[in-house]
Amino acid sequence: GKGGVVSATGSFSVNQVAVIVNYCSLEREFLPKVLAECAHFASEIVVSVGTHLYNGTPEDPEHLEALRAQHTGVRFAQYQVDAHIDLAAQKGVEHRPHAYWPNVARWTGVQALDEPQWVLFLDADEIPDGPRMRAWLEQTHLDFNCCYHLANYWYFKSPNNQALTWEQTVILIRRNKFPEEHIFSDRERDS
């Protein structure tokens, strides 16, 4: 069924949550687990992937086609990566040029969305606990004026190697609360 907040009667309210996952084929071990967990609560899932890795190596087209065939309910949005551009000259990343491509990935994902009310930004190694996230959404009245900075674990090399400490990198935010210039920032999701 559709994700979002469930009312006391069990019917879905208008709070739809879409997930944007930044991805590259080096993270292929993580993606099936991330997508399976997000399916518990997301109304739509967009995987944002570049034409190349950030170092200029071409992305694996056969792998991407296999993913599209395997995950038919997921939208894959691809953006053009040019390893020869001057990252320091790109908008919003004067102090942290390496933030440019993750920002492009997120903005590409945003552009591929339908009209969700809420957007959850994940990297492929940030695997949510789908049933727990759904339960939280069902029990929480999301404040339309808030951005939720969620505590999370990250994973190292495998979806089985969970970090031992929390970090706070995952953002849940209303779609109408961030314009393009907030995405293109040195601070990435924290902007």
Image (cartoon, rainbow, N blue to C red):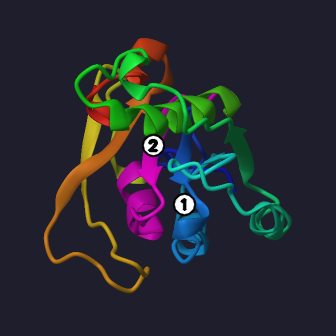
- Where does the magenta region start and end? 115-137
Q: Secondary structure at mark 1?
A: helix
Q: Residues within 10 Å of mark 1 (few under 14, many from 20)?
A: many
- Look at mark 2 in the image and give the residue it sits on: 120
Q: Determine whether label 2 and label 1 are within 8 Å by CB.
A: yes
Vertical position of residue 101 compared to residue 28: above or below: above
Residue 84 found in image quarter: top right
The answer to if 3 sits in the magenta stretch is no
User: In x, y percent, where is residue 111?
Assistant: 65, 26
Nearer to us in this view, 28 or 141: 28
Please tell me which residue is depicted at 42% across the width and 66% down the height of the picture: 127
Q: Which disc number belongs to residue 181?
A: none
Q: Quadrant of the C terminus?
A: top left
Residue visible at 41% across and 65% down in the picture:
125
Q: Position of residue 43 (x, y in %)?
A: 63, 46
- The number of numbered discs placed on residues in the rendered structure image is 2
Q: Residues within 10 Å of mark 2 (few under 14, many from 20)?
A: many
Instruction: Reply yes or no: does residue 132 show up in magenta.
Output: yes
Give above or below for 112 relative to 52: above
